[in-house]
Amino acid sequence: MSKQTVEFKGNRDGVTIYCLDHAEFSDILSDLAKRLKKRAAFFGEAPVRIDVGQREITEAEKQALCDVIKQNSRLHLTAIQSAAERPPAVAAARRQGETDDLRLDGFKEGRAIVIKRTLRSGQYVRFPGHVIVLGDVNPGAEIVADGDIFVFGTLRGIAHAGVNGDRGASVVALRLAPTQLRIADIISRAPDDSELPEQPEYAYVSDLGIMIAAVTTKLGS
Amino acid sequence: MGEVIVITSGKGGVGKTTTTANLGVGLAMKNKNVVLIDADIGLRNLDVVMGLENRIVYDLVDVVEGNCRTKQALIRDKRHDNLFLLPAAQTRDKNAVSPEQMQKLCEELKQEFDFILVDCPAGIEQGFRNAIAGADQAVIVTTPEVSAVRDADRIIGLLEAAEIKLSRLLINRLRPDMVKRGDMMDIDDIVEILAIELIGVIPDDEKIIISTNRGEPVVTNNNSLAGQAYRNVVQRLLGETVSFLDLHQHHSFFSRLKRLIGFGG
């Protein structure tokens, strides 16, 4: 039972104790008591916030948390919050080295995989994030991503972006010539007489279905 | 130490067996010690193309099962003393051999021969896995058809996954007149999709069918363009640099211009 159940994070408002989502509530109480006792001197009388994460807690459980704090430290409990109630500054402060601009509209964050090779017929990539291919995606190959798909090469196979229903996902390729294109729950196929495009293109969802537009230098403005 | 080369394609009927026979004879003509292994168990053909069918006593399955010594199963070619065939069994199926057994056999043959060419069956199942098990490199045969190129792409992916260090492409049965009319994929289209090194382009040639039926590979025929193309592939296998045959007999000014500035094949 040495698995960690709580995490202590310091920020300019004091200390926040995060209760990890996988942990049992009873383990959290005992672990918290143990660690507070050990580091009571270090924390002193700082203000503390308890973040219970995704779980819903009862009044009795709230009281139990208050008691543990009070009995094992001199910390000053200011709030008990859930993940949904986290002030934005707290979430942002959890990671170092990020600029404020990261929260701008049009910035999309998430895991990504970079594939530095050509995907050939019969090869299948499923990834819970964005997929970036430096190479071609040949006919018969398939990419399925939770996020966006970028192909720095010719996309001739099947690409499915935003597979969990994200209609904001897009598919970009230097030469976009897929056998089939899927974004979220929308499917489109290439016209039967289509030729290779001469410039990079991207596909996105509009009210009319999946649309294709040329990637130009003015795209981001 | 010899080199094991598997001749494969995915799709059937594109000319794997013909290619194996011609490259084998071509290498033998260059005084190399060569053995051809027919890995198409149950559908053997290589013996017929080589004209050696009536000499088969033991076969590949007999060797791996220990019914005979490897030497006993090797059939010496009619014309070339340094060329041998290890025929497939006709009465068994692909499961009669395992990849481990093939690997062991290839290692054994590598000690005595310069080149071991393995004629792979069509498909991507057990027979394919057996054929590539002991291979150091591969020659992928395709024809200028969308379906054959698609299968070749699949095969290249599987060879990459199997960590075969060198895969090269042989385009078979090209018809320059049809390419010129725009009715057939041209070499550049195929190479662009498959993105591997080209080792040869064999033009469609009636003489191949004639020679196959006679059991005399066309590579020995000095009057055949296909024979010349195969001889060039053999030289490339031996590490020599040979320019590609000019299959278009008559050039327009424009295509010659394109060739000059480096777009042409």
Image: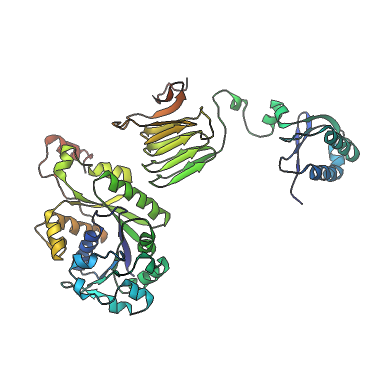
Residue at the spot 45% in from the left edge and 35% down from the top edge: A150
Q: With respect to residue A189, does A7 lie above or below? A: below
| Left/right of residue B7 with respect to residue A216 in the rendered view | left
Q: Left or right of A207: which side holds A47?
A: right
The residue that appears at 28% across and 69% down in the rendered structure is B90
Q: Does residue B207 appear anywhere in the picture?
A: yes
Horizontal and vertical percent position of residue B58? 28, 76
User: What is the number of callouts on the image?
Assistant: 0
Q: Nearer the viewer, residue A217 or A146?
A: A146
Vertical arrangement, residue A165 with respect to residue B17, above or below:
above
In the depicted structure, whether residue A11 falls above or below residue B29: above
Q: A161 or A192, which lies in front?
A: A192
The image quadrant that residue B42 belongs to is bottom left
Q: Is residue B239 visible?
A: no
Query: In the shown orientation, is residue B130 left or right of residue A7?
Result: left
- On the image, the x and y values in percent for residue A177 come to 35, 34
Q: Report the side of B2 relative to A81 (left or right).
A: left
Residue A40: horizontal and vertical position, in percent? 87, 40
Name of the residue lying farthest toward the right? A71
